[in-house]
Image (tube, rainbow, N blue to C red):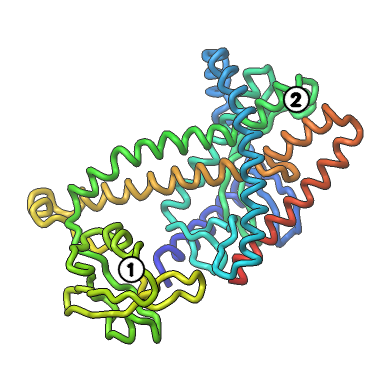
Amino acid sequence: MSTELIALIVFILLMSVFLIVKRKNVEIQKIIFPLFYFILYKTKIGIGLMEKIALKYRKTIEYVSYAGIIVGFIGMAAISFLLCSNLYKAIITPSAMPAVGLVLPIKVKGTFFVPFFYWIISILVIATVHEFSHGIVARKIGLKIKSSGFAFLAILLPVIPAAFVEPDEKKLKTKSCRQQLAVFAAGPFSNLILGGIILGIFLLAAPPIVERIYDFQGVQVLDVTNASPAFNAGVSINETITGVDGKNVTYTEDFINLMSNKSAGDKILLKTDKKDYEIALGKNPKNNQSYLGVSLSQKAEFNKNLVKKIGTFIPSAAIWIIGLLYWLYLLNLGIGIFNLVPVGPIDGGRMLQLVFRKILKKKGDKYFKAISMIMLIVIVANLLIGFAK
């Protein structure tokens, strides 16, 4: 059993015990109970801070929240188009992958794997920022926050953590359309902003740190496809490719660039740490491009001089933090824009439903339900294709 799976099991057990002990503050929202349901642990955590921020930065929050509405509708259109177009591609092209998948810390077919500790930290940060932003904008327009706290999507047991803020929904409906939209858009917009900030930090910090820590030594062969040109030439797993046609390969990008202009039938001289191979490239049956038949990864080791000076702990910690930044930006952007899908009770759905009600009056709910159902079918179809491939 992997360390990641053990950590996930321990986390689920600890959360289950915690929720049992705190059951007086727990509310269960049934979906398909007891198979699927939400668990809400209600507290007053953060409400005071939301109040302070809302009062202190009223003008800034107003401008940012209105920008969030514009970005929200642009993102809604973008993610809807992406989901539909990718579903079409996934159906007609066997090699195409669906645009959406469950984000989980276990390797299961059809899911998007994230190592457990990156997963749990990222989910908690994303959920906290998302809901806290809803709360700040709600307080800015004068809505009372009834409670805040942690939530869990339960599949028999609490599995996926989240956070929530519970504003006064009755009073929210009395606010102007623009104010309601600002509240709904605040969560996804905050995730997109945070994702962009972290991406900037990642792009600035990661390259010089990685270059300082690692010595890059070529491209390692992870797998060789049976009956492929590489297999027939005798290339084996764990060999390190160091050159193509007399040109050095230090980074994965070097190899990709050197191979990008090759065509099926071309002969290449592949240099590895074991021997040189003369290989005639084949044709990839999926896309008719040149085909070698290997899976590769960057080969690198800690810089020996650096390790002699400071040991391995600091370099290992630095690389782990860079990995965390990567997942934080990627998941913030992904989950932020997914929350804008016009489906049911999620933020994008509430935004579109409100606008339809405003413009189309009584027919608004009818048209929204139709769009919501179509998008739900598209999402489920993407998920099912991911599991099937």
Q: Identify which residue, 59 or 171, lies in the foreground.
A: 59
Circle 1 residues within 10 Å: few <14, some 14–19, many ≥20: some
Judge whether 301 appears above or below 20 on screen: below
Q: What element carries label 1?
A: strand
**Residue 183 placed where, x, y %?**
66, 27
Q: In which quarter of the image is residue 93?
A: bottom right
Residue in view at x 64 percent, y 56 percent: 154
Q: Identify which residue, 329 or 40, lies in the foreground.
A: 329
Q: Does any portion of residue 293 appear in the rendered image?
A: no
Residue in view at x 73 percent, y 36 percent: 350
Inspect the image, locate mark 1, and give the three-letter code of the amino acid beneath it. Answer: Leu
**Residue 331 placed where, x, y %?**
49, 47
Residue in view at x 29 percent, y 73 percent: 221
Q: In this view, does 326 lie to the left or right of 354?
A: left
Q: Identify which residue, 66 or 253, lies in the foreground.
A: 253
Q: Is mark 2 on a helix, strand or loop?
A: helix
Judge whether 293 appears above or below 334 on screen: below
Q: Quadrant of residue 69?
A: top right
Residue in view at x 56 percent, y 36 percent: 130
Name, please, the residue furthest toward the right: 362
Earlier-in-chain disc, 1 versus 2: 2
Residues under labels 1 and 2: Cα distance? 54 Å
Judge whether 233 appears above or below 68 on screen: below
**Residue 104 placed where, x, y %?**
52, 58
Inspect the image, locate mark 2, and give the three-letter code of the amino acid beneath it. Answer: Leu
Circle 2 residues within 10 Å: few <14, some 14–19, many ≥20: some
Mark 2 — residue? 172
Mark 1 — residue? 296
**Residue 155 placed where, x, y %?**
64, 60
Which of the image's four quarters has the C terminus?
Answer: bottom right
Q: In this view, does 227 lie to the left or right of 142?
A: left
